[in-house]
Amino acid sequence: MIKTVNLQKIFRTEEVETWALADVNIEIAEGEFVAVMGPSGCGKSTLLNILGLLDNPTSGQYFLNGKEVSKLKENERTSLRKGVIGFVFQSFNLIDELNVYENIELPLLYMRIPASERRERVKEAMDRMAIAHREKHFPQQLSGGQQQRVAIARAVVAHPKLILADEPTGNLDSKNGAEVMSLLTELNRDGTTIVMVTHSQHDAGYARRTINLFDGKVVPEVVL
């Protein structure tokens, strides 16, 4: 599903050139659950942003479902991102002015899904994440664990083939963190490909394998 060839990302200012990624070559098959690990500043989130079509590499190639996507036009990237990828972030990224139902429904509105189908999909996602009883609540009325469940529901409501998760338990206590990881594992068991950035060896233990980064470079993988 995912393949990168000599992927590089360089951030430049007038005085400084910073290599965030240097010749990154990875392959992730459909249906895998992969943890990307490494110390702060090693390039984990930069890699995830490129895989999620939120950023462009400076050079190299990125293939998604066999298609080279790093040179696509912005409207093509947006369309592909909406149709294939779901995102889960450490900070939840919920909209405070929208209730649980409306936050989850948002991707379907962007996709112009008919109202009856939207309702069915949102209900399915809420039931799966066990948050249907919070349908009318707003983010500030939820616990951290509940907010992350809403975020995961929003990520899966469009039925993406790939979920990218950036430190999904970073703002949660151990109990809620374990519940979130179990939910991601269940989604993977049902066939969703998951790529998760984490600094936690414990969370990485839920994945099938790890990709380790150090100073923007891939170090030998460890099969868990």
Image (cartoon, helix red, strand yellow):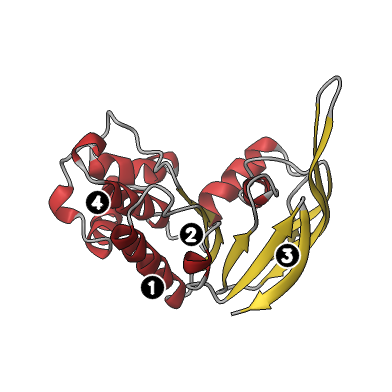
Measure the alpha-carbon separation of dots 4 and 1.
Answer: 23 Å
* Element on which disc 4 rests: helix
Left or right, 93 with reference to 80:
left
Left or right, 170 with reference to 7:
left
Residue 1, can we see it? Answer: no
The residue mark sitting in front, 2 or 1, is 1
- Of callouts 2 and 1, the N-terminal one: 2
Measure the alpha-carbon separation of dots 2 and 4.
Answer: 17 Å
- In the image, what residue type sits under mark 3? Gly
The residue mark sitting in front, 1 or 3, is 1
* Element on which disc 2 rests: loop
- Of callouts 4 and 1, the N-terminal one: 4
Which numbered dot is residue 160?
2
- In the image, what residue type sits under mark 1? Glu
- Of callouts 3 and 4, the N-terminal one: 3
Identity of the residue furthest to the top in this view: 14
Q: Which residue is mark 1?
A: 186
Mark 3 neighbour density, 10 Å: few (under 14) some (14–19) many (20 or more): few
Residue 14, can we see it? Answer: yes
Q: Which residue is mark 3?
A: 66
Q: Which residue is mark 4?
A: 119
Residue ID at (53%, 54%)? 85
Residue ID at (57%, 73%)? 32
* Quadrant hosting residue 129: bottom left
Residue ID at (57%, 48%)? 81
